[in-house]
Image (cartoon, rainbow, N blue to C red):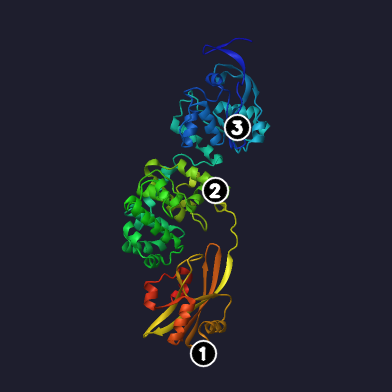
Amino acid sequence: MRKETNLGAERKRITHPFPPLYDKESKILILGSFPSVKSREQAFFYGHPQNRFWKTVAGVLSEKTPETIEEKQEFLHRNHIALWDVIQSCEIVGSSDSSIKHVVPNDLTAILEEADIRSIYCNGAKSFQYYEKYLEEQTGKKATKLPSTSPANAAFSLDRLMESWKQICGPLQAAPVGIGEILLNWYDYNARILPWRSDPTPYHVWISEIMLQQTRVEAVKKYYERWMEALPDVASLAAVEEERLMKLWEGLGYYNRARNLKVAARAIMEEYGGELPGSREALLKLKGIGEYTSGAIASIAFGLSETAVDGNVLRVFARILGEEGDITRQKIKKKLEKEVRRVLPQKRAGDFNQALMDLGAGVCLPNGQPLCEECPWESVCQAHREGREMNFPVKAKKKARRKEKKAVFLLEMMSNGTLSVILHKRPAGGLLPGLWEFPNREGQFTLEKAKKELEQWFGKTEYRIEEENVLGEGKHIFTHVEWDMVGYGFRLEVPEKQLRSVMEENDWVLVTREEAKKQYAIPSAFEKYRNFV
């Protein structure tokens, strides 16, 4: 072999000394030209200590730079990155790409067949040049040229390299570095003014977050203010009577949330001296506090670096990343939660979580076209880039709700000179446990059939109808069942002895209209008919 000198080194013909790194989960393939002397000595990619490949890719993915070969391998597999080089063998002087001659290219067939490679990137101009010349026809895939991470590429600082290399995040479905700060800048000018944000104590954050589950912000505001007047702290919540608690919660739905609040408040009084604990782990042990709520309290009230991922956040990140998986599956939820944590600003985690709430509620809308032109993440959103915003998030179709028809009876009568109404307390188990309702019956009713039902309750001759009305149709949708209701109003005169017997037999109570409004929690399922009281 003819010897030449270049930078004091000898031209040699060298065969690539180590194999590609990939697995079946790999989503992108990053190609170098040919390994440097240091890489050949280490038998692994980008071995020169001044090569910025590992700092660049780790920085883009908001991760710590791997140091050992084992850490680098784990990092690549975890992030679904395949590494290989264009050249299988060549004549080369030292590490100089410009000295390469007599190239034999690598065969990429096995990688492309065994892995789900969505994009190919070339690390530097030489790699890209060799790819176009030797491999593009073989693969049938265009590659993207990225600036070289070599120390010889002095024109690019590390920050500039990371900005260019951010594009690998698209096919990796990884949240790009820096978008957390972008969102915070948007939030600083667009944050909603909400009563619980003005004084975000742990108690205020806790109560507001529980109320906001399954309920619109505008609807929660009045409930929150009324609650804080009545129960301003943990001690008052722990001591409140059940009926008072339910009345304060009336209309918010999912009443077990309120019961769980009281159970948790008692535990806080007993175990933490009336102050909510300041760690996510301890918060999770309290009744009714799950992953989302614990993260919200920990980050907003205690300033801890914790995520708070709910349906709003899953929708936003499914669109940002173009996530095709079903977000109701635990595997996909965990994947998206990992991406939220990847970009979580450590010093303003609470603001970041609230910014995500505002973004999901006001811009990245759940029902209807999102307002992409107002979104601070418009430029990095995969769904928007592809014009497929409405395709995300992907959710399995819900089972059809069971439909039930009901007749609701508003039964009124004079008692001690006051117009009173009959209520019934629902059983402790099942739907709306322990709440008050108007007497009702399942089935399709007419006014005549409803009057027949009165005979079943009061006997044919033991009462008199003074007034009768059809109160109209009502509908209420629960998670798994839908009530289609028709209301019937009757003002009755019933002998006292007969009334007591019927009340006892049916577990009814007779309360004044004022008491029904102020003391008895009648759920929003009956809202149409409680408005007649």
Residue 497 vertical position relative to residue 337 in the rendered view, above or below = below
298 relative position to 371: left or right: left
Give the residue pinned by disc 1. 461
The residue that appears at 49% across and 88% down in the rendered structure is: 462
Point out the frontmost of discs 2 and 3: 2
Any mark on residue 152, and which?
none
- The tag earlier along the polypeptide, 2 or 3, is 3
Residue 327 vs residue 421, the one in the foreground: 421
Q: Is residue 233 visible?
A: no
What amino acid is found at the position of numbered circle 3 in the picture?
Tyr
User: Based on the displayed image, in which of its 4 quarters is residue 434 positioned?
Assistant: bottom left
Residue 261 vs residue 151, the one in the foreground: 261
Give the residue pinned by disc 2. 330
- The tag earlier along the polypeptide, 1 or 3, is 3
C-alpha span from label 1 to label 3: 86 Å
Coordinates of residue 320 in the picture (x, y in percent) = 51, 46
